[in-house]
Image: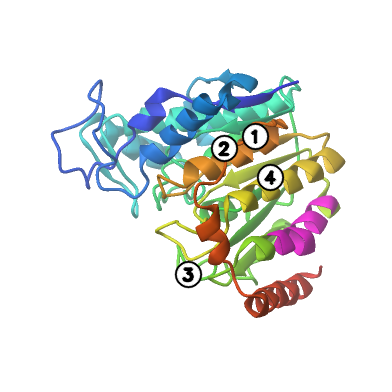
Amino acid sequence: MATGFYSDEKCFWHAGGDYALTLPLGGLVQPLAAGGLPESPETKRRLKNLMDVTGLLGELDCRTAPPATRDDLERVHPAHYLDAFKAMSDDQGGEIGHHAPFIRGGYEIACLSAGLALGAVQAVARGELENAYALSRPPGHHCLPDDPNGFCLLNNIAIAIESARAKGLAERFVVLDWDVHHGNGTEAIFYDRDDVLAISLHQENNYPLDSGALDMRGRGAGEGFNINLPMYPGSGHTAYLHAMDRVVTPAIEAFKPDMIIVACGFDAAIFDPLARMLATVETFGALTAHIKATAQRVCAGKLVLVHEGGYSEAYVPFCGHATIATLAGSAIRAPDPLAEAAIKRQPTAEMDAFLRASIDRMASQLGF
């Protein structure tokens, strides 16, 4: 079986309505830029282009998928929110939440983005693909049921999970979020549930400022099934892998999911403008290898990565390439052009020991 790669050109056409200093956009008028948003199409487009140039794209099972249906959306988002989103989208777009603007037609693009995640999850669940990567845009992990924020308009991963459950394809899921910002939308949606283990590795006190605390463990039936690991700014390659060893792997092995889904942001990368972490191209390859091996042990390799954040147009493509090549078991590499600079900026031995000790303390408080 092959690794699937889900994408659609229309997802690159998403732009921020309120922030766009251009003529009214929508329909067949492709935006010239992201409308002032840091969440630019170029990070994703350049990733896909790089994969094409290196030949990696030719080793993947490249697919698209239909948009998520209204029934798919309503398993996660209430009708009043979807109605308001669609009405604004049919007009001239706007901003319906916090830092989540869109142009005319944004509703349809968001449904397509969710559909890519949904298609990837269902194909892997059915055994059509070994694993898959969904190049979804707009992203989704900040979107609560009726409160879009942080560039996220629909919760792509939650929609994919609920659709798979409705079709009887899987019951128990792990959502591992290594985007540098806390996955507050995913947390809110599954906070009372014991069939989804949500794990978020994020920079402490980044976005959103008031979420992602270590003691947010779930509620009711969901008690203990929500894990936040707020990591100090300056955490680099070694700290991220230590977090995987000390918390992520034992938590997943104890939970025994049917499938693992990664909210795959690249904004923990060292050159990202919206964060202060020090992950590198090598880090993302190593994280992918780690979670792929875990999936092979606990859920027959059923693993889907869904694209989230990452705002360095120069660096995201190389982080993504390493991730997808590792996922596919490909020998094709795109050498990190900034590797020397990245290595020089890694934490000192003393700082690295401090960062790993902080993860150990959190692991102990979490019971690992």
Left or right: where 251 falls relative to 134 = right
The residue at which mark 1 appears reads as 325
Between 180 and 124, the one nearer to me in the picture = 180
> Which is more N-terminal, label 2 or label 3?
3
The residue at which mark 3 appears reads as 210
Q: Quadrant of residue 347?
A: bottom right
How far is the residue under mark 4 from the one under mark 1? 9 Å
How far is the residue under mark 4 from the one under mark 2? 16 Å
Pointer 2 with pointer 1, Cβ within 8 A: yes
Q: Secondary structure at mark 2?
A: loop
Q: Secondary structure at mark 4?
A: helix
Image point (33%, 30%), residue name: 13
How far is the residue under mark 2 from the one under mark 1? 9 Å
Residue 23 appears in the picture as rendered: yes
Residue 229 place in picture, x, y as percent:
64, 66
- The relative height of residue 183 versus residue 173 in the rendered view (above or below) is below
> Which is more N-terminal, label 1 or label 4?
4
